[in-house]
Image (spheres, coloured by chain):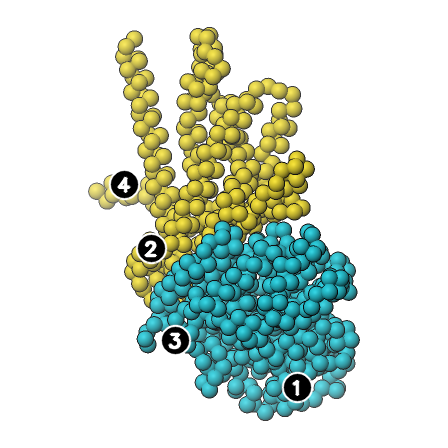
Chain colours: A cyan, B yellow
Amino acid sequence: MISTVKKIALVATFMAGVAGAALGGPYDAYKGKTLVVNFPAHPHYNAVMKVLPEFTKETGIKVEVDQLEYLKMREKQTLELTKAKGDYDVIAYVVFSKADYVFADQLENLARFFMNPLLADPAYDPADIIPGYMQNIGEAGGKKGYLPGPTASLFGIPFGAETSILGYRKDIFEKHNLKVPETYDELLDITCKIPKLEPGMGGLASRAASGQHASHAYLLHLAPLGGKVFDDQWNPVINNEAGLKAAQTLKTIVDCGPEGAKTFGFAEAGAAFLQGKTAMFLDSTVFAGQVDDPSKSKVVGKVGWAMHPMGVRRASQTGGFGIAIPKNAKNKEAAFLLMQWLTSKKADKLIALQGGNPIRFSTHGDADVNAKFPYMKTFGEALKYADPDWRPIIPPWGKINNDLGTTMSKVITENADIKASFDGLAQRTQATMKEAGYDTWK
Amino acid sequence: MQAANSHRLTPYLFLAPAGLVLAVALLYPIGYMVYASFLDWNPSQKINEAAFVGLRNYANLLVDPAFRESLWVTIKFASVVVSLEMLLGVGLALLLDRKLRGMTLLRTLFILPMMIAPIVVGLMWRYMYHPTVGTFNRALKGLGLPPVEWLSDSNWALVSIIIADIWQWTPFIFILALAALQSLPKSAMEAARIDGATGWQQILHIKLPLMMPVLIVTCLLRLIDAFKVLEVVLVLTNGGPGLSTEILSLRIARTASEFRELGKAAAMSNYLLLFLMVLTLAMFFYSKATERRAARLRAEAEGAH
């Protein structure tokens, strides 16, 4: 694990010296302090690394970054957060860790920082941050525990967040006079037409590998098709009509997909699209940065972007990372200043220009950002429909997610009967939920 | 009296440091695992915050279809790879137990797969199994045969990881079997040859029985290892498709990190430990029994003279 740790100390002492005279106000008290932060190895955070020296220059606060592979990061944080005195002042967490960390009371409630006039920047404009992201990644304690609502509070701020978007080959669509799919019916129709129109090419690149990947791909279709994993009383409803339709949808997509699609993970699905083996791609916005990079992509300049198609409603996914202050952090105030700076309008734009994923509407509409990444505007549009409840974020989710992923994989690879498989899944999920205490009030 | 007592204690005194190291290094972690298996413990809790649930984890596992499927996959995998590896490894050893030019080089070549890090082995085979650009499917295509879904068909996936494991671990059996062969008493071989035993008879009635003690230990070591294989499967299929290649150690790793159920993961590890212990003991008693039988036969033979 140590070997994967990339410790980069951003010591800009001379810069701080130069800027020293100009420093004033909120950052003075923390000048010269060093913050230790834990970030994942992820395109967004690679962009952040390029912008961080700017923070040190502006504030005199040094930042030491511990960058880890994201699953490793979660394991390390789990240990780190149970210590009496932690090493990290700021952590980036995967969205599904929210449930675990907040439930174990390991993250600072951000209210006391936003109330503190010495720390909170009045120009911060939180309403500009995409609500779907804020609700999905930052808030907890509202409806069903993991959603916003009258009883919710804020524990983190989205940073490196992503939604789902449809990428398509403009040249192929033009050649065959196809219309960019707006709805799921159109999407499925085109997906299965492509292999006939362009022999050797698959319709849509999707993940399907057993476990997390298949589950993610399934949930991507479940929300727009009007389904949910649980109803409001925590009963699994994944085997209702919408749930089964989502499974059939994914199966159709994989069947009409490129060769080997049954075991694609995120990377393989992306690679298939970049290698020109599929005409469409429907997954995370994180992927978009690579499409026009000639060293990775054979489809430079040929890709157009559109919103996640609509089923009975529009609902694109919300996910990715947020940043938070651990309860056992040593420099909480300075940590808040860093968080606020990183998610400010200014830094959001700087990071976006370096290829990161912005979290603000203003950045998505920004002229400079769009000049460099023309798809940002479409992403901004899509984000209005970002659904914070496209999957539940509760402690037993890891287990249910895995079961969903293997069940879906059996449907895809073994042609297991969808109805029977999902009835079984719902039954097992009910048992897991019971074990976790979700039927206490029934 | 006092002196006699202290004399009697002396050996224990000398044994004490070793005993202490054993207790700290071996028994403590195992004890910890056994204790953890009685808890409902998630990794965000300290161990003393976890609730004691007695045998609930063990009981739940027994009726958990995913665990049972995973156990079955593991048993299938381990028994197939170990029998094939034993067959191939011992066969190779019998073939190569002779003086040939460049033998040392050949032997080194044979044991190379064993020295490669399992993650690398996994990656290598994953590329070879790739549905379109992989070596195997391209070879099949070249021969005009239909491609095989090596890793995405639930029947083939297990076969694929079995092939990769055999490739990597046959050399282990080979090298131990060869060492055993070369240390066999020359006199027995000579006697057999003089008595006119054919090659097959020599192998079946002289070499194999004499090698048996080494082979049993080798087999046991491989079996224990096969039950714990993780990396190659992780890289090749990650347990999929479905649960078709989700071997027990992968399920344990998942239970601990993805499902965050440390207690249940510990209970699974204990089931595995128990299972392996039963196997080891069975092997141990079997070899004891054969030894005793051999000794009796020898005694009878000597008595007859």
The answer to which of A441 and B38 lies nearer the viewer is A441
Q: Are marks 3 and 4 in contact (CB under 8 Å)?
A: no
**Front: mark 1 or 2:** 2
The answer to whether residue A282 is seen in the rendering is yes
Q: Residues within 10 Å of mark 4 (few under 14, many from 20)?
A: few
Q: Which residue is mark 3?
A: A233
Please tell me whether mark 2 sits on a helix, a strand or a loop: loop
Give the spatial CA distance, label 3 vs label 4.
71 Å
Chain letter of disc 1 in the image: A
The answer to which of A6 and B260 lies nearer the viewer is B260
In this view, B78 is above or below A252: above
Q: Please give the name of the residue rendered at 59% of the width and 67% of the height, measured from the top-left corner.
A: A185
**Front: mark 2 or 3:** 3
Q: Which residue is mark 4?
A: B8
Q: Are marks 1 and 3 on the same chain?
A: yes
Give the spatial CA distance, label 1 vs label 3.
50 Å
The C terminus of chain B: image quadrant: top left
Q: Please give the name of the residue rendered at 59% of the width and 73% of the height, measured from the top-left corner.
A: A310
Q: Which residue is mark 1?
A: A28
> Looking at the picture, which amino acid does disc 2 mark?
Val
Give the spatial CA distance, label 1 vs label 2.
61 Å
Q: Are marks 4 and 1 on the same chain?
A: no
**Front: mark 3 or 4:** 3
